Amino acid sequence: MMLIECPYCGPRNEPEFAYGGQAHVAYPEDPNALSDEEWAQYLFYRDNPQGAYAERWVHSAGCRKWFNAIRNTRTYEIQHVYRLDQARPDGAAPAPTTSRQEA
Amino acid sequence: MNQRELPQHPDFLWSNPEPKKSYDVVIVGGGGHGLATAYYLAKNHGITNVAVLERGWLAGGNMARNTTIIRSNYLWDESAAIYEHSLKLWEGLEEELGYDIFFSQRGVLNLAHTLQDQRDSVRRVEANRLNGVDAEWVDAQQVKELCPIININDDIRYPVMGGTFQPRAGIAKHDWVAWGYARRADELGVDLIQNCEVTGFVMDGDRVVGVETSRGRINAGKVALCAAGHTSVLADMAGFRVPIQSHPLQALVSELHEMVHPTVVMSNHVHVYVSQAHKGELVMGAGVDTYNGYGQRGSFHVIEHQMSAAVELFPIFARAHLLRTWGGIVDVTLDASPVMGRSPVDQMYVNCGWGTGGFKAVPGAGWAYAHTIAHDEPHQLNRAFGLERFVSGDLIDEHGAAAVAH
């Protein structure tokens, strides 16, 4: 079981949280402009790296707020937690491929 | 039910050759799917200049970690076709491989605990029958007759309202399945190379022509990925993406007990699946840990949750002792159906996304994947399972539909 540091409530047990998958995958600015391939990338494809991963968690049995974490998917060590209005720590984890392609 | 005697095995089931400079086909991943693919490439298509590269030891990944449930009662036509083909191959596999795999058709019960469960189950039974898959709806009393240790009282949180039963479903001894395929593939000329990790791909334009490994470069006419939870890592090296997420999936066994559990019981709603292996240990699994992970371990509260479900369904398990828990890394797609077909790289093929249920598919997937590799186009069985479906939208949504604990 992981000890997860909620940015609002402090460290709590993992069962208090729910997982939200990869962070920073933005809804396409103009969905109608996307090709079927690009739409498929947005809808069905997420990065799945071994190592640092920027991901979303929600403290569902606590303050019910969403936040982001950088966690190592090999060791499960949480390196950073940050609020949604804070930027991803520089160099902590790669940006999502989908957003890179849109940029 | 009597315990079966263990047969004697020969000392060596396969040779451990040094890798050659070049192969017609290199299969990346020496688990069940990789070994079955190699066997059917040789047996069905006469392609024997084949290497299976395994970074650890043969069948030491998910093949060593699964709960060995075999069934074909999936909802959709495409799934029923490939899983039923697989089940038919299972039914002849001991003879085919000349090797005892303890395939035991003891049936699988998929329980229903809510009215919605019940409606979905009956619908699935009808769909299964239309596809030639044996299936029946059984009420709670019949569940009790099939599995006397189950609690069908209505004073528990999620009472058993009935279930679906597939009599031809069952379990097999997972490592012997792998060894049986490995032995025959080796006899047919396939090189099984262990401790050989793929670290990169050699490209000629859009075409793959070899692999870089921890044991040097190996040239390849074709490269077939068969690496389950690690497929994303390999696809990254090859420059394309696969729509999978890798999750830890945990299982556990109890100490050995006399035979008390005559079938396989799965419950999607309270989330546990249980059988009793031939030696007498109770084998149980549940859902994945929700986060992405490559650590081959998960969180304890997931085990706790599945144990509480198991004890409510089987009160006599309350005094059983846990012997061991473990985790594997499963490759989950968003529609809970596998990906098998050509990849965006010329002469490279992809087989992944079997999620939590890849063991049952070992023979069928190997069969269809070998065809795909040999002919550079999918077999009828896996035509619907290509990467294209995520662009076209022709998803095969087995999430929940097949009473799967995916």
Image (cartoon, helix red, strand yellow):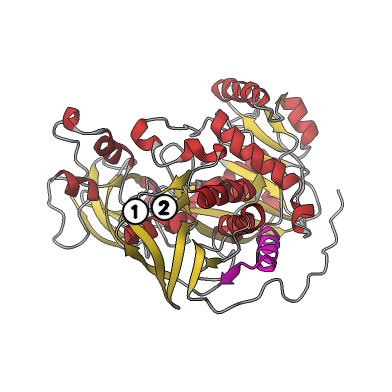
Observer-nearest of A5 and B32: B32
The residue carrying mark 1 is: A48
Tell me where residue B127 appears, x and y as whole percent: 61, 23
Q: Chain of mark 1?
A: A
Observer-nearest of A65 and B359: B359
Q: Secondary structure at mark 1?
A: loop
Tell me where residue B392 appears, x and y as whole percent: 36, 31
Q: Residue at x 76, y 53 (%)?
A: B96
Q: CA distance from mark 1 to mark 2?
A: 7 Å
Q: Can you say whether A52 is above or below B18 in the image?
A: above
Q: Residue at x 52, y 48 (%)?
A: B375
Would residue B180 be counted in the magenta stretch?
yes
Q: Is residue B257 left or right of residue B391?
A: right
Question: Are callouts 1 and 2 both on one chain?
Answer: no
User: Residue A49 occupies which quadrant of the picture?
Assistant: bottom left
Tell me where residue B89 appears, x and y as whole percent: 70, 45
Q: Are marks 1 and 2 in contact (CB under 8 Å)?
A: yes
Residue B307 shows in the view: no
The residue carrying mark 2 is: B246
User: Residue B97 occupies which quadrant of the picture?
Assistant: bottom right
Observer-nearest of B184 and B148: B184
Q: Bounds of the magenta span?
A: B174-193
